[in-house]
Amino acid sequence: MRLGQAAMEALRAEITGCLKPGDELVVACPVALKGTSVIAKNKKDKLAERFSAGFIQNCVSLWDAYGAGSIVWKIAQEADASALYAMGEGGFLSALWKMAEASEVGLEADFRKVPIRQETIEVCEIFDLNPYKLQADGAVLIGIRGGEALVQRLRNEGFMAEVIGQTNSGNDRLLYSGGSARYLERPAEDELQQLLKE
């Protein structure tokens, strides 16, 4: 179901630029950093049953240590990116849906290429959370022609970055993981909200 005009305008206001068919999708900085940090601060006792104090403290500081700064935006804009979106609530999957919906493009993306820290994977396993739906402040989704060149520039500056997919002029938005594919769905509630209610 398509968004109404007011909702679409509000969505487009969140995004810098607009994706074009044929753009490569780049994720700069690991996803779910903020969510991992918040969980580590709020669920220390549960995490301490399995992890060392050093590991937990590392999780707390992930967002500050690995998140995107203004330099990522500057590099992407200098590289003539079509669109940029600072990820946040709802995580990577929410960001991907919002950018595709606002730009009215189809896409194909591969979960296996999305930058993610091992700490995030381990914390999410403890609480049975989907890291791709977890608060992702600190990561940026970028649409650009020539994604590999941008990735190299970002890596040279010390940022994790990967080309994770490409847009097209169709309606389908497909997510791949190994041999299986599924459709990108409208965002649900952030995994962090569910956890902190408990």
Image (spheres, rainbow, N blue to C red):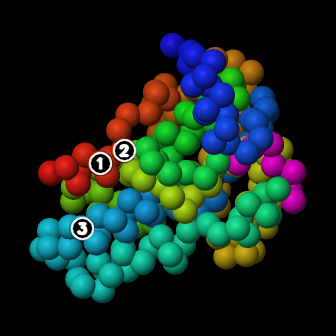
180 in magenta: no
Q: Residue furthest bottom?
A: 54
The CA distance from mark 3 to mark 2 is: 16 Å
Local SS, label 3: helix
Residue at image point 19% right, 49% down = 197
Residue placed under numbered mark 3 in the picture: 42
**Amino acid, disc 3:** Asn
Residue at image point 73% right, 75% down = 157
**Amino acid, disc 1:** Gln
Q: Look at the image and tell me whether residue 178 can be seen.
A: no
In the visual, does 112 lie left or right of 194? right
Q: Position of residue 119 (x, y in %)?
A: 37, 69
**Amino acid, disc 2:** Asp
The CA distance from mark 1 to mark 2 is: 6 Å
From what the image shows, is residue 15 above or below residue 69? above
Which segment did they paint magenta?
78-84
In the visual, does 103 lie left or right of 32? right
Residue at image point 67% right, 34% down = 12
Q: Position of residue 122 (x, y in %)?
A: 30, 64
Between 12 and 142, the residue placed more toward the observer is 12
Residue at image point 57% right, 58% down = 139
- Disc 1, disc 2: CB below 8 Å? yes
Residue placed under numbered mark 2 in the picture: 190
Q: Earlier in the sequence, mark 3 or mark 2?
A: 3
Residue placed under numbered mark 1 in the picture: 193
The CA distance from mark 1 to mark 3 is: 12 Å
Between 52 and 37, the residue placed more toward the observer is 37
